[in-house]
């Protein structure tokens, strides 16, 4: 079986900022009856001081509390920075129905509704963490994207973001996306890859950060969860029937260590979401449900935070935007 987290040996050339090593000026902190909102949705699971979906931690490892909501909003800003301010990579022309799968805090759907006021925007998620006051053309539904969809009308655009680890059957999910798109409709999947790379020798194998991600990879593969799906999307989308697959990959430095001004700014924001939310939110439940003690996890994360705050490790990950289209006409089957 292929690794559930794909490593790479090809690195972009990023010139480190030799002036700003150590404590830098950036600092360290920095319509449908799909489902009803059943009372069971609000029966959250609590453990280790964090709140998780009512579906249970073993179903979805990331929390859905205020800290995670803040991280998701910051990650939304980072995605827009990598897309030069745009909400998506797909070029849209007057979309009328848009579905945002895994809407999280709903920030993308809300801003999409403001940008396209004539469009109907629906955001779905398993957690009720979206605001009540939204543009009149935006609404949210509690729904499990991994189960059968019951939308009565099809969509012009389906947007999927940050669903890694939450779906057990991606091919089945993409088949549903295809089914619920209008002919000629578009799909876009945006994910941050769950691996850290380094193009030089500044990321020692015996560093706590390297140890942490190696253990994370081991536990993910043991669980069978899919946390790094982007290398497989091209084949999956083609199998589902989509055409015109394209992929945009953007470097996300962990910290403001690059000399390049744009990457430095992106890296500073990504470092904040990594240290103040992403690191613990991805690791805590996974590790404690695999035999680690809570205090052991927190001790490891403290070492990782200390290493990352130095800005001396030139580590990065990637944001990937995968796009494809449903054919305007059904494919002709040869006799």
Image (spheres, grey):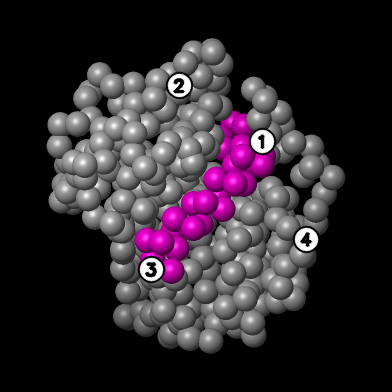
Residue 197: percent from left, percent from top: 25, 39
Residue under the point 62% across and 76% down: 114
In space, the residues marked 4 and 2 are separated at their CA atoms by 36 Å
Q: Nearer the viewer, mark 1 or mark 4?
A: 4
In space, the residues marked 1 and 4 are separated at their CA atoms by 20 Å
Looking at the image, how many numbered discs can be counted on the residues? 4
For the residue pair 169 and 292, the one nearer the viewer reads as 292
In space, the residues marked 1 and 3 are separated at their CA atoms by 33 Å
Residue 151: percent from left, percent from top: 67, 69
To which residue does mark 4 refer? 132
Residue under the point 45% across and 21% down: 302
In space, the residues marked 3 and 4 are separated at their CA atoms by 29 Å
Q: Nearer the viewer, mark 4 or mark 2?
A: 2
Residue 17: percent from left, percent from top: 21, 45
The answer to whether the residues at label 2 and label 1 have Cβ atoms under 8 Å apart is no
Quadrant of image for the C terminus: bottom left
3 or 2: tag closer to the N-terminus = 3
Q: Residue furthest right?
A: 39
Q: Nearer the viewer, mark 2 or mark 1?
A: 2
Q: Residues within 10 Å of mark 2 (few under 14, many from 20)?
A: some
3 or 4: tag closer to the N-terminus = 3
Residue 69 in the image: above or below residue 94: above
Q: Is residue 248 visible in the rendered structure shown here?
A: yes
Could you tell me which secondary element the residue under label 3 belongs to?
loop
Which region shows up in magenta?
A: 57-85
To which residue does mark 3 refer? 84
């Amino acid at each position: 079986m292929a690794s559930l987290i794909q490593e790479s040996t090809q690195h972009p050339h990023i010139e480190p900022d030799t002036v700003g090593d150590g404590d830098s000026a950036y600092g360290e902190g920095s319509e449908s009856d799909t489902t009803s909102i059943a009372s069971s949705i609000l029966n959250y699971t609590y453990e280790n001081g964090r709140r998780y979906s009512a579906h249970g931690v073993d179903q979805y490892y990331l929390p859905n509390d205020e800290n995670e909501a803040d991280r998701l909003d910051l990650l939304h800003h980072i995605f827009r920075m990598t897309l030069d301010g745009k909400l998506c990579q797909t070029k849209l022309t007057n979309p009328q129905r848009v579905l945002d799968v895994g809407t999280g805090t709903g920030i993308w759907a809300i801003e999409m509704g403001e940008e396209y006021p004539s469009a109907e925007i629906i955001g779905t998620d398993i957690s009720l963490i979206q605001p009540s006051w939204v543009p009149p053309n935006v609404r949210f539904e509690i729904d499990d994207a991994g189960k059968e969809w019951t939308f009565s009308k099809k969509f012009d655009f389906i947007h999927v973001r940050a669903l890694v680890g939450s779906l057990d059957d991606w091919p089945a999910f993409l088949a549903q996306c295809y089914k619920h798109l209008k002919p000629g409709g578009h799909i876009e999947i945006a994910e941050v890859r769950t691996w850290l790379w380094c193009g030089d020798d500044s990321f020692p194998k015996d560093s706590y950060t390297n140890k942490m991600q190696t253990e994370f990879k081991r536990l993910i593969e043991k669980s069978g969860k899919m946390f790094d799906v982007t290398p497989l999307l091209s084949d999956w989308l083609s199998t589902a029937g989509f055409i015109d697959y394209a992929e945009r990959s953007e470097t996300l430095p962990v910290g403001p260590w690059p000399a390049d001004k744009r990457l430095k700014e992106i890296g500073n924001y990504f470092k904040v979401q990594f240290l103040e939310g992403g690191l613990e939110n991805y690791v805590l439940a996974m590790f404690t449900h695999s035999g680690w003690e809570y205090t052991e996890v927190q001790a490891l994360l403290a070492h990782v935070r200390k290493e990352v705050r130095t800005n001396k490790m030139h580590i990065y990950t990637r944001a990937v935007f995968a796009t494809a289209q449903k054919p305007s006409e059904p494919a002709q089957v040869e006799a």
